[in-house]
């Protein structure tokens, strides 16, 4: 036990005096796999820049408040996209997390930015401005949902 405590103290001192990992992490996200990226990319209007890469969990400016609990890192799974919001600058997909208590420290509504319109100055962060009433059912029916899969990752700078 004494040896364990000594080694633990040494580890803590190295962490405190060493490299601050939070400085190299840009954001934490549920990063989509290739198939999910392709599904959402197919919905992008012609001429728009496709994003469809991730669902932000901790935004870059929130990283200063700490990292995601380690039990969530490397989480792999699937979620459902239930509705889409779009204006002349950005298109985004609303994600239903089901009963998974994923601790979001970012956007108020979990979503994946599908695409931005460079011709109108669209930026990915504009998708954060959508309200719940802005989201509409997925077209065309009868496929009212899209399953997306991936894993939680800390995206490095």
Image (cartoon, grey):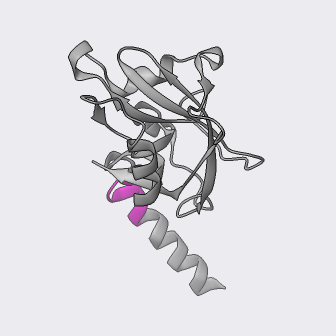
Residue 33 seen from this side: no
Q: Position of residue 141 (x, y in %)?
A: 63, 35
Query: Which is more toward the observer, 136 or 90?
Result: 136
The correct choice, above or below, for 22 with respect to 110 in the image is: below
Residue drawn at x 66%, y 39% is 142
Residue drawn at x 56%, y 34% is 140
Q: Position of residue 153 (x, y in %)?
A: 46, 56
Determine whether, in the image, residue 139 is placed left or right of residue 34.
right
Q: Position of residue 53 (x, y in %)?
A: 39, 46
Residue 125 seen from this side: yes
Determine whether, in the image, residue 80 is placed left or right of residue 25.
right
Magenta range: 14-21
Q: Indicate whether residue 19 is drawn in magenta.
A: yes
The chief SS type of the magenta part is: helix
The correct choice, above or below, for 23 with respect to 106 in the image is: below
Query: Which is more toward the observer, 32 or 21?
Result: 32
The correct choice, above or below, for 112 with respect to 73 in the image is: above
């Amino acid at each position: 036990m004494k040896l364990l405590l000594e080694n633990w103290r040494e580890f803590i001192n190295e962490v405190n005096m060493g490299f601050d990992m939070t400085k190299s992490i840009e954001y934490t996200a549920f990063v989509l796999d290739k198939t999910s990226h392709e599904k959402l990319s197919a919905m992008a209007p012609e001429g728009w820049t496709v994003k469809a890469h991730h669902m932000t969990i901790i935004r870059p400016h929130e990283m200063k408040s700490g990292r995601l609990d380690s039990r969530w890192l490397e989480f792999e799974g699937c979620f459902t996209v239930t509705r889409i919001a779009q204006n002349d600058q950005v298109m985004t997909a609303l994600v239903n997390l089901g009963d998974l208590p994923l601790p979001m420290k970012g956007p108020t509504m979990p979503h994946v930015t599908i695409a931005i319109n460079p011709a109108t100055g669209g930026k990915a962060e504009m998708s954060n401005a959508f309200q719940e009433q802005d989201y509409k059912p997925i077209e065309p029916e009868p496929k009212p949902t899209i399953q997306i899969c991936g894993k939680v990752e800390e995206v490095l700078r």
